[in-house]
Amino acid sequence: MTIDLSSTAKPAIDPDRWPGVATVPAGPVAALSGRVADDLLQRAARRLPLRLLYPDGSVIGAADPTLPTLRLLHPDRLVRRVGRSGLIGFGESYMAGEWTSDDLAGVLTVFATSVADLVPRSLQRMRPIALVRQPKTHHNSRDHARRNVAEHYDLSNDLFAEFLDETMTYSSALFESLPAQWGDLATAQHRKIDRLLDTARVTSGSRVLEIGTGWGELSLRAAARGAHVTSVTLSAEQQHLARQRVAAAGLSDRVSIELCDYRDVTGCYDAVISVEMIEAVGYQFWPTYFRTLDALVAPGGRVAIQAITMPHSRMLASRNTHTWIQKYIFPGGLLPSTEAILSITERDTSLRTVDMCSLRPHYAETLRLWRERFTQRRDAVAAHGFDEVFHRMWELYLAYSEAGFRSGYLDVYQWTFAATGGRW
């Protein structure tokens, strides 16, 4: 039996737009590293609840056909890419249409569950030599930070509107029950925002600073309580739409949306709130970020963040390397660990934890709903000028993120700190 490739043809690849996707590693070194990668992939399939399906119909791995199946449409190209550049190559191979799956999130969840054991320890010791280091442009100085943020958030407001709910909230929701339906999402986003505002003690008359505007929903919810909100963003597209939404709600007298780096904010606020912003700050600037929050919150005030975290050991192993997510989705980003956040806040600030709440299963559901919506809106996304390679890239990004939370490799916390005084 052979696989019918008519429905899984390779996308047209613009080599100027996608140079890493258009080029398959060639030569004897690529062939040798490809054989090593092929051996590792087959070993993984034999011991994990996973199946590899080859073009000739042969299967390696679990016998159960209902288990997640990775369909290798061009296996030689896939393993050459993985052998040369690891997970970057794995992602680029998907973008190039060289492998696929009817259960993409399921396949990636299996890998995420066993991420620490996929590569033998003897080869892990070569990681610092083999992996690509981050480009200097990913260092989040003020100029680089604005460019890095724009590369993701300034893609198009219309693009994000295709898969986000009407609140235009691009962070984990908090559902009343799981599993969730699309119709639950807007209410769940409001529940998430309201919980943050509650733990930050935002009430009528509160002076609130939001670092990372998104498209303005948190500012709108805070202002509806009677708070006065200053919200800062580095995304011109987000600022434009957020200002429109504030004006339409008749709240321009209570909400100011500014294009400003968090390091340049001044003032004193009763509450400082930052939702899934620390992930874009960069490892070198985490102390600066928390010192800034500490300096801006009034004595006795609250700081509330929502932060995606990864295991500390993996954070240390990957903090200086270049990943597929950094190359194609979030340049300059890195997920912190809970240990890193605790260490920095306790050593460098007066901020002390008063509340932590994990939303991990809720983020998995949020991402599933976004991914399904994004897939359904394929034609609409294309109409906005995004090609098939981009669409496959974002499918992989959303499924990859969902898998991280479903496997437990990633977590996300609403984390509230009290400002205890005694500045650093």
Image (cartoon, grey):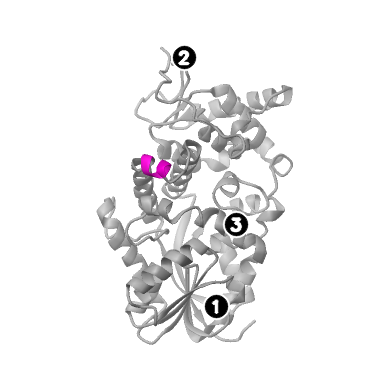
Q: Is 190 placed above or below 67 here?
A: below
Report the span colored magenta.
379-383
Query: Mark 1 = which residue?
Result: 351
Residue flagged by tag 2: what amino acid is it?
A: Asp
Q: Is residue 364 visible?
A: yes
Q: Which mark is residue 196?
A: none
Mark 1–mark 3 contact, CB under 8 Å?
no
Task: Categorize mark 3 by other alpha carbons within 10 Å: few (<14), some (14-19), many (20+).
Answer: many
What is the CA distance from the residue labelled 2 to the residue labelled 1?
59 Å
What is the CA distance from the residue labelled 1 to the residue labelled 3?
28 Å
Comparing labels 1 and 3, the label whose residue is closer to the camera: 3
Query: Mark 2 = which residue?
Result: 56
Task: Categorize mark 2 by other alpha carbons within 10 Å: few (<14), some (14-19), many (20+).
Answer: few
Residue flagged by tag 3: what amino acid is it?
A: Asn
Q: Residue at x 59, y 40 (%)?
A: 17
Magenta-colored stretch includes residue 181: no
Locate residue 393 relative to residue 422 in the image: left or right.
Answer: left
Q: Which mark is residue 148?
A: 3
Badge 1 element:
strand
- Residue 342 versus residue 287: which sits nearer the camera? 287
Mark 2–mark 1 contact, CB under 8 Å?
no
